[in-house]
Image: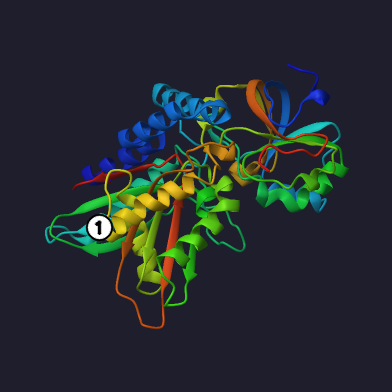
């Protein structure tokens, strides 16, 4: 893996490491401080996984545009990168965080890249709970880099 | 489980794990014409369906909400078919992702309840579509000025898809229903979608419009996942119905590349 800060829009790379996994509802809880969590130096993966019989069976990205409104707030709290699919305005990242795309609809293949996972909070929300995944060689495309350049404009 | 319930249950699970052969073929052909990032995206899509089939995993974490289009023949009782569908869906989604909330505003998690649409015909047929939520956000209803022609409609659709198609997991399958009022237009759009990618509209005007629309959408350059490329749609279908002289309704239903549709014949 390359030194993350040198990554540029359009680069492919394989990510190995920890990500915080959540989506629409949990993001709202975080931003309203109804759920407290230190987000400094984290990478967020927007995903609502299929968890059955103690295994993650499928875990592709969800559409990031629905989360866009809350992204500046998460960047302020120290999130360094977001993984999702679809369009995100580079301005919401304030040149302080990356947007990485992975392949929507590739949930089975991406689930094979999880080495371990935990349910961190709100298990009752099912796919909308807060998880952490330990990823191994997870395929990513740099969609917005730290200069604000994007791959889709 | 009763035989019909079991058949529907197994079909839902199969659709969540295995793409229809015609869809795979379209995706593979598209992969051969693409280069660079677009090719890479389609290679991962291909690896995904192989993984899903091999290990019995859902193709996508969004296993959708199950839509049922039932053509009910004389020999079958709608009540029995409905019970079989409801029970089969509840059982199948215990193995998939429960993506439904029972109340859209208060967001209460729920077990999966299917949506069923009925028609009557000679032979009974149950068509199933596992509809993902990401692409559904792109489905829309338009009301054109009744004197708008084909050209104006086409430009509006292209303008609409240009910015938004990237969010719906392209390459897409799109169904278009023109005419009627909002309900008829929407039902026609699903009719058009469900015959893809195998069949064209039977009339010349609409079948050539389908081809033209596919070509023009693909020229937008959005490509697989919006990563650029030649393949933004893998199929466009159009169906039409009569219309009020004051209306020109158009419903657009959008499906992602994970086009999980199939049929059961009781």
Q: Nearest the camera: B140 or A56?
A: B140
Q: Going by the image, does B249 lie left or right of A8? A: left
Residue A135 is situated, as x and y percent measured from the top left of the image, at: 66, 23
Position above or below: B248 against B154: below
Q: Which residue is at 23% across, 59% downward?
A: B203
Observer able to see residue B137: no
**Residue drawn 54% across and 31% down?**
B38
Q: Which residue is mark 1?
A: B204
- Relative to residue B106, is residue A123 depicted above or below? above
Q: Residue at x 53, y 36 (%)?
A: B229
- Residue at 75% of width from left, 53% of height from top? A69
The N terminus of chain A: image quadrant: top right
- Which x, y percent locates residue B209? 35, 56
Residue A123 spot, x, y in % from top left: 64, 41
| Quarter assignment of residue B191 | bottom left
Q: Quadrant of residue A23?
A: top right
Color scheme of the displayed model: rainbow
Number of other residues with Cα within 10 Å of mark 1, as a class: few under 14, some 14 to 19, many 20 or more: few
Residue B112, given in percent of the width and then of the height, sits at 45, 50
User: Split into 4 quadrants, where in the image is the C terminus of chain A?
Assistant: top right
B54 vs A34, nearest the viewer: B54
Q: Is residue B129 left or right of residue A29?
A: left
């Amino acid at each position: 893996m390359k030194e993350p800060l040198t990554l540029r829009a359009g680069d492919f790379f394989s990510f190995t490491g920890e990500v915080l996994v959540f989506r629409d509802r949990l993001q709202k809880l975080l931003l309203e401080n109804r759920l407290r969590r230190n987000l400094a130096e984290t990478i967020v993966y927007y995903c609502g996984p299929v968890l059955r019989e103690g295994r993650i069976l499928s875990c592709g990205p969800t559409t990031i545009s629905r989360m866009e409104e809350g992204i500046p707030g998460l960047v302020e709290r120290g999130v360094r990168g977001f993984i999702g699919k679809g369009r995100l305005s580079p301005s919401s990242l304030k040149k302080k965080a990356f947007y990485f795309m992975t392949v929507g609809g590739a949930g089975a293949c991406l689930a094979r890249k999880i080495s371990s996972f935990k349910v961190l909070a709100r298990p009752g929300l099912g796919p909308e709970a807060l998880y952490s995944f330990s990823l191994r060689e997870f395929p990513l495309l740099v969609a917005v880099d730290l200069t604000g350049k994007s791959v889709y404009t | 489980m009763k035989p019909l319930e079991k058949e529907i249950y197994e079909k839902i699970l199969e659709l969540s794990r295995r793409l229809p052969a015609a869809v795979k073929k379209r995706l593979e052909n598209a992969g051969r014409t693409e280069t660079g990032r677009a090719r890479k995206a389609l290679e991962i899509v291909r690896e995904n369906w192989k993984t899903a089939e091999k290990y019995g995993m859902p193709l996508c974490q969004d296993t959708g909400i199950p839509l049922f289009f039932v053509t009910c023949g004389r020999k079958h009782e709608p009540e029995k078919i409905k019970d079989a569908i409801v029970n089969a869906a509840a059982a199948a989604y215990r193995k998939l992702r429960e993506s439904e909330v029972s109340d859209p505003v208060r967001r209460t998690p729920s077990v999966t309840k299917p949506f069923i649409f009925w028609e009557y015909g000679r032979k009974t047929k149950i068509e199933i579509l596992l509809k993902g939520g990401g692409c559904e956000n792109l489905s829309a209803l338009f009301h054109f000025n009744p004197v708008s022609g084909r050209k104006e409609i086409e430009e509006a659709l292209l303008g609409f898809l240009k910015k938004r198609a990237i969010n719906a997991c392209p390459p897409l399958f799109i169904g278009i229903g023109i005419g009627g009022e909002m309900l008829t237009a929407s039902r026609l759009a699903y009719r058009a979608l469900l015959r893809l990618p195998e069949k064209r509209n039977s009339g010349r005007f609409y079948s050539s419009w389908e081809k033209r629309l596919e070509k023009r959408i693909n020229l937008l350059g959005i490509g697989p996942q919006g990563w650029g490329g030649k393949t933004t749609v893998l199929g466009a279908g159009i169906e039409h119905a009569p219309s009020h002289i004051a209306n020109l309704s158009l419903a657009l239903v959008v499906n992602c590349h994970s086009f999980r549709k199939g049929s059961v014949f009781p």
